[in-house]
Image (spheres, coloured by chain):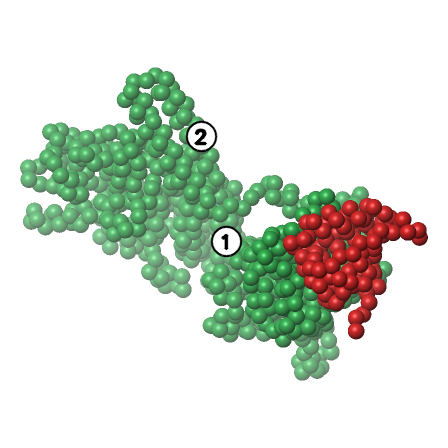
């Protein structure tokens, strides 16, 4: 067994569970029925604790244990959940996330830097449990004698075993590799005393199928030793590739043994017997732990149909019998296997690197297909051309299917904002809710990753500047609770994301006045409403009247716009005074393949993203100048030939491609226009990361490499020149 | 029990991976020769996992086929392993304590 793999799984699962926990906490209805949400939260904490125990992550176990204790108290109605506790539990979620991230970074111990935070949270958790005791207990001396349920529970939960429990499953080939499991057990005995041992021969096949040179045995060992985990694992160092080793530390909680039973391949009932046999856990302890788990699982699966006979375990527990309760574990395990299978059939977890690799390969396929069709044309072979045409049709389908694989729902990103809105509303002292719509809209994973920050800014901005204080809202006849709405939908090859608020809306006069004051527009220019609203995306523009905690962070709407434009998207704002503001972000569905336009300079071919091109015109320059006259307006241009130092004389008829990026417009002088091209974007090697004006490369049907121009960067260089032009003229 | 009903087999020397495959055939064949098989282990000087597995397989096959298998005269090498692995109950034979 590869421990690293298992640990990775643990990290991934923990993150998911913490996400679930956070969502459940945010959606909890303080006034209404909360049992379902509390169970969900409890389950998440409980599972993390159990799994962390498997890896001896004591700091995580210790922390989750207290969280779990509080949740348990809430579940049993001993403590009443309030707003303060939800905030506290959310902080606990964050702390656990921090520990999980630390784990992912290879830190297996508590981080001393954050230990103080953890201690503070623990104190608060205990205080909430203690307060409960004070309320229900005798009022007089309540403060003096605060019982600590957390500590008591730990005592009740921990097993009595002072022994390590070692679970070994040797691989089939171990004997053929010259290792003898018995020899390892003898060697183990030198580190301590084998207090109990059960030999597991369940894997032994029928006589006819049994190969006497393969190993079928496993061992459950209770081991009395002061040696540490490393030392015990060290015994099995030579067989670690050929043996599954599971260790449960002395005095571990019984639930960890139950986890062990679940992790092992054999029949849980047999395993339970064996654990009892080798003395690692007593029958009563196992029964108690199982009873507790079956309770929580029974709560978790209320949809059990009536024709399922009552669970054996629960009956036995109710009857006070203990020994056959291990059967319950067997039933649970069987049920889990069925459930897991059903889920596995629906979806599988794939490393995103593999998908990226697939997209890469599809890209190669498109290029190879283009090459085949070029050859077909060159050879004038009808048959070959027919074949390549069929091929390219299929390749296109494969491309679309592959790109679809990388599509993820935006819901997960949206749901993160529940927390943001909750926290920021608190910070601002406003009552604000979040409505999420269109969570099922899909977009490329890379886009999702990059859209988070701009969206965050838009949401914060809407909360800070959009939503008015409660008294102003009430005076305006609106509900005191402000609403932020996130919406997503597809529209002609792009995804549209809207962030709206029902606040005061943008005030045109104020924006215009500010823009004129800042010299962004001429005072006598007539602007449409839309143009005025979009001024807020200009650099150095802010209408915030007072600096709050949120504004004045040096990030303005212009940065949002730049980030979105970098994703080849656009952003737009609409508003009606007194009703609210809606910011609309439009993004391409994918970043891997774009519509490009091919141009040629000497032998080099370049790709320009099609959506940045305004028009193509015949080249005509003012003599000796780097600008031309486009219908009476000055059009600065860049000669691609001189920009990239391409050798050779210009052709007789050069062309100018007019580009527009944001507010900047410029021309690009090229030799030949080659037309549109489906462009598979290939990133450039990091060596070229310093090269400006190139954003990537692609491969043409002829096999030649074409560079993709970074229009944003190109036009920035012109902008500098544009500023210099009037100076020269003067 | 008549003499024909009990088959005797004695093993000696090293019972290990090198002999395991042959031993498996030998023991299973002996097992099927009579309702009861008694294996004398007095001469066994070494037993390894592979050898032990063959004995365990024989015991389980015997149980499945409603035959009997008894191990007799465990040598110290065998006792050592049966005790360490807590297999006394599995084989169900009286193990002689060697002085």
Q: Residue at x 30, y 26 (%)?
A: A374
Could one spot residue A74 in this view of the protein? no
Q: Position of A579 compared to B84: left or right? A: left
Secondary structure under tag 2 reads helix
Q: Is A23 displayed left or right of A429 in the figure?
A: right
Residue A697 on image: x %, y %: 29, 41
Residue linked to disc 2 = A397
Colour for chain B in the figure: red
Q: Residue at x 29, y 45 (%)?
A: A695
Pair 1/2: label in front: 2
Give the colour of chain A.
Answer: green
Q: Nearer the viewer, residue A66 or A576?
A: A66
Residue A54 shows up from this direction: yes
Q: Is residue A682 left or right of residue A518?
A: right
Q: Quadrant of residue A491?
A: top left
Which quadrant of the figure has residue A26? bottom right
């Amino acid at each position: 067994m590869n421990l690293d793999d298992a640990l990775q799984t643990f990290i991934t699962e923990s993150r998911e569970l913490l996400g679930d926990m956070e969502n459940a906490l945010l959606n909890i209805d303080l006034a209404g029925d909360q049992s379902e949400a509390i169970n969900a939260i409890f389950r998440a904490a409980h599972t993390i604790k159990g799994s962390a125990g498997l890896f001896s992550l004591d700091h995580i176990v210790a922390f989750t244990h207290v969280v779990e204790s509080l949740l348990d108290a809430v579940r049993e109605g001993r403590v009443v959940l309030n707003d303060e506790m939800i905030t506290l539990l959310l902080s606990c979620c964050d702390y656990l996330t921090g520990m999980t991230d630390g784990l992912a970074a290879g830190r297996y111990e508590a981080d001393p830097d954050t230990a103080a935070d953890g201690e503070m949270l623990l104190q608060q958790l205990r205080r909430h449990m203690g307060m409960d005791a004070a309320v229900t207990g005798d009022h007089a001396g309540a403060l003096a004698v605060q019982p600590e349920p957390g500590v008591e529970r730990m005592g009740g939960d921990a097993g009595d075993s002072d022994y390590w429990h070692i679970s070994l499953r040797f691989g089939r080939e171990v004997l053929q590799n010259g290792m003898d499991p018995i020899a390892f057990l003898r060697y183990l005995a030198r580190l301590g005393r084998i207090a109990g041992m059960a030999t597991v021969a369940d894997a032994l096949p029928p006589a006819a199928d049994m190969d006497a040179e393969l190993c079928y045995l496993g061992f459950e060992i209770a081991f009395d030793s002061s040696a540490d985990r490393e030392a015990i694992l060290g015994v099995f160092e030579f067989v670690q590739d050929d043996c599954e080793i599971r260790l449960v530390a002395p005095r571990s909680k019984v639930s960890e043994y139950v986890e062990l039973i679940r992790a092992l391949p054999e029949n849980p009932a047999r395993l339970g017997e064996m654990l009892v046999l080798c003395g690692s856990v007593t029958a009563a302890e196992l029964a108690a732990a199982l009873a507790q788990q079956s309770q929580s699982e029974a709560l978790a699966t209320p949809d059990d149909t009536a024709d399922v006979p009552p669970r054996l375990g629960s009956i036995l527990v109710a009857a006070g019998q203990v020994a056959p309760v291990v059967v319950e574990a067997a039933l649970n395990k069987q049920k889990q296997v069925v459930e897991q299978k059903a889920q596995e059939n629906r979806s599988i977890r794939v490393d995103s690197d593999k998908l990226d690799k697939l997209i890469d390969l599809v890209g190669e396929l498109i290029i190879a297909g283009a090459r085949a069709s070029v050859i077909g044309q060159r050879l004038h072979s009808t048959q070959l051309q027919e074949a390549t045409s069929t091929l390219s049709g299929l390749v296109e389908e494969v491309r679309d299917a592959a790109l679809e694989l990388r599509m993820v729902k935006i819901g997960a990103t949206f749901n993160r904002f529940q927390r943001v809105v909750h926290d920021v509303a608190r910070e601002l002292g406003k009552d604000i809710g979040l409505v999420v719509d269109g969570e099922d809209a899909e977009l490329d994973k890379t886009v999702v990753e990059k859209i988070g920050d701009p969206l965050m800014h838009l949401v914060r901005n809407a909360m800070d500047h959009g939503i008015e204080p409660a008294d102003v809202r009430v005076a305006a006849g609106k509900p005191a609770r402000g609403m932020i709405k996130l919406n997503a939908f597809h529209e002609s090859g792009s995804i549209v994301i809207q962030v709206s608020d029902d606040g005061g809306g943008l005030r045109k006069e104020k924006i215009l006045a500010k823009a004129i004051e800042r010299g962004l527009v001429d005072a006598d220019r007539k602007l449409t409403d839309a143009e005025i609203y979009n001024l807020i995306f200009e650099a150095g523009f802010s209408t915030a009247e007072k600096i709050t905690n949120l504004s004045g962070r040096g990030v303005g709407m212009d940065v949002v716009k730049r980030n979105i434009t970098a994703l080849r998207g656009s952003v737009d704002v609409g508003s009606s005074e007194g009703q609210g503001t809606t910011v609309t972000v439009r993004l391409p569905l994918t970043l891997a393949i774009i519509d490009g336009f091919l141009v040629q300079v000497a032998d080099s071919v370049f790709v320009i993203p099609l959506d940045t091109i305004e028009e193509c015109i015949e080249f005509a320059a003012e003599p000796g100048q780097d600008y031309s006259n486009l219908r009476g307006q000055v059009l600065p241009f860049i000669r691609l030939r001189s920009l990239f130092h391409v050798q050779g004389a210009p052709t007789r008829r050069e062309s100018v491609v007019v580009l527009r990026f944001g507010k900047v417009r410029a021309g690009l002088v090229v030799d030949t226009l080659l037309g549109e091209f489906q462009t598979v974007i290939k990133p450039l090697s990091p060596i070229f990361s310093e090269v400006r004006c190139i954003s990537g490369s692609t491969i043409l049907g002829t096999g030649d490499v074409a560079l993709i121009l970074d229009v944003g960067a190109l036009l920035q260089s012109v902008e500098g020149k544009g500023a210099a032009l009037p100076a020269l003229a003067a | 029990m008549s003499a024909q009903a009990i088959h005797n087999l004695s093993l000696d020397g090293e019972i290990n991976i090198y002999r395991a495959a042959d031993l498996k055939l030998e023991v299973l064949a002996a097992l099927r020769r009579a309702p009861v098989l008694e294996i004398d282990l007095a001469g066994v000087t070494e037993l390894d996992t592979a050898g032990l597995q063959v004995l365990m397989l024989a015991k389980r096959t015997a149980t499945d086929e409603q035959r009997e298998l008894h191990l007799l005269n465990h040598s110290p090498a065998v006792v050592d392993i049966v005790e360490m692995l807590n297999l006394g109950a599995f084989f169900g034979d009286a193990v002689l304590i060697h002085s």
